[in-house]
Image: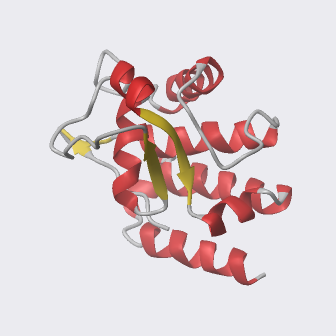
Amino acid sequence: MSIRQAKIHGEIIVAKPVLLLAIIDGVEANVFRNNQFAINDWLEGRYKMLMSKYAKESQFDNLTGIEKPFWHLESDGFWHLNYQGERLCKGRTPSKAWLKESVDYAYFDEALWILLQNKEWRLKLRDYIIEHKLTDGFWNNKDTAVNLCALAAIILVA
């Protein structure tokens, strides 16, 4: 499991890890009981709250909308979109309205979903994302993707 983050004008965008935190929080709160995640009021509200917290030092005036990480997480390999019809080419990010109309839901690889059912591992993954993807100390660590894969492997073996 690796989360690639875009870098714009020297700033690493935190939208993908923030969306993952919002989903982990939703699993914790029993909002998500199945491995199916749609853009809804709860998810969008939680995402915005977390974006406000973790993107507070951003040079950009507007926070990244939920549609961008929802769409672009698919390229990381563990997040998948279940389309109602035709897929859109990956050249551009679709609008939130298009995603709501054209994607039934997103889902994780089965192994990650199983891991998220365990509270202890869910909290460890949440803490890991915060520490290694959303804090200042992360930006100096080039091995974070490798470490995230190692953490996932350890969790799945345990």
Task: Report x, y in % for residue 47.
Answer: 55, 28
In the image, taking residue 7 as reference, residue 20 lies left or right, namely right
Q: Is any atom of residue 4 visible in this view?
A: no
Single out the residue that lies furthest toward the front.
85
Residue at x 24% of width, y 40% of height: 88
Residue 60 quadrant: top left
Q: Is residue 11 above or below residue 100?
A: below
Q: How is the image coloured?
A: secondary structure
Q: Nearer the viewer, residue 126 or 29?
A: 29
Q: Is any atom of residue 35 visible in this view?
A: yes
Q: Is residue 113 above or below residue 8?
A: below
**Quadrant housing the C terminus:** bottom right
Q: Nearer the viewer, residue 39 or 26?
A: 39
Task: Report x, y in % for residue 128.
Answer: 62, 58
Residue 58 quadrant: top left
Task: Report x, y in % for residue 117.
Answer: 79, 57
